[in-house]
Image (spheres, rainbow, N blue to C red):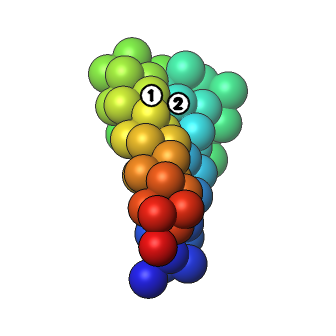
């Protein structure tokens, strides 16, 4: 269960960073993406990345108690 939590948290961080990159225009792939240079995706990406970090911290703390 811990491994699944870490994987989910890591994927959330990864997707959040991709969304930040696309929203800011630094990662314009694919070129036809609706997310490129849209500030709202920077915000959503930051929220998703922060949530992913929180998931990994929670999983780490639960691991120590068991």
Residue 38 drawn at (x, y percent): 39, 22
Q: Can see residue 4?
A: yes
Q: Secondary structure at mark 1?
A: helix
Q: Residue furthest bottom?
A: 1
Residue located at (36% from left, 31% from top)? 47
Q: Is residue 31 above or below residue 35?
A: below
Q: Which mark is residue 31?
A: none
Displayed quadrant of residue 6: bottom right
Q: Is 42 placed left or right of 44 in the picture?
A: right
Most foreground residue, 24 or 48: 48
Q: CA distance from mark 1 to mark 2?
A: 7 Å
Mark 1 surroundings: few (<14), some (14-19) or many (≥20) residues within 10 A = some
Q: Which mark is residue 20?
A: 2
Most foreground residue, 33 or 42: 42
Mark 2 surroundings: few (<14), some (14-19) or many (≥20) residues within 10 A = many
Residue position for label 1: 46
Residue located at (66% from left, 36% from top)? 27
Residue 48 drawn at (x, y percent): 39, 40
């Amino acid at each position: 269960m811990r491994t699944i939590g870490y994987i989910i948290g890591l994927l959330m961080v990864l997707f959040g960073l991709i969304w930040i990159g696309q929203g800011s225009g630094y990662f314009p792939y694919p070129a036809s993406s609706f997310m490129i240079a849209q500030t709202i995706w920077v915000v959503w990406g930051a929220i998703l990345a922060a949530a992913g970090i929180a998931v990994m911290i929670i999983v780490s703390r639960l691991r120590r108690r068991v």
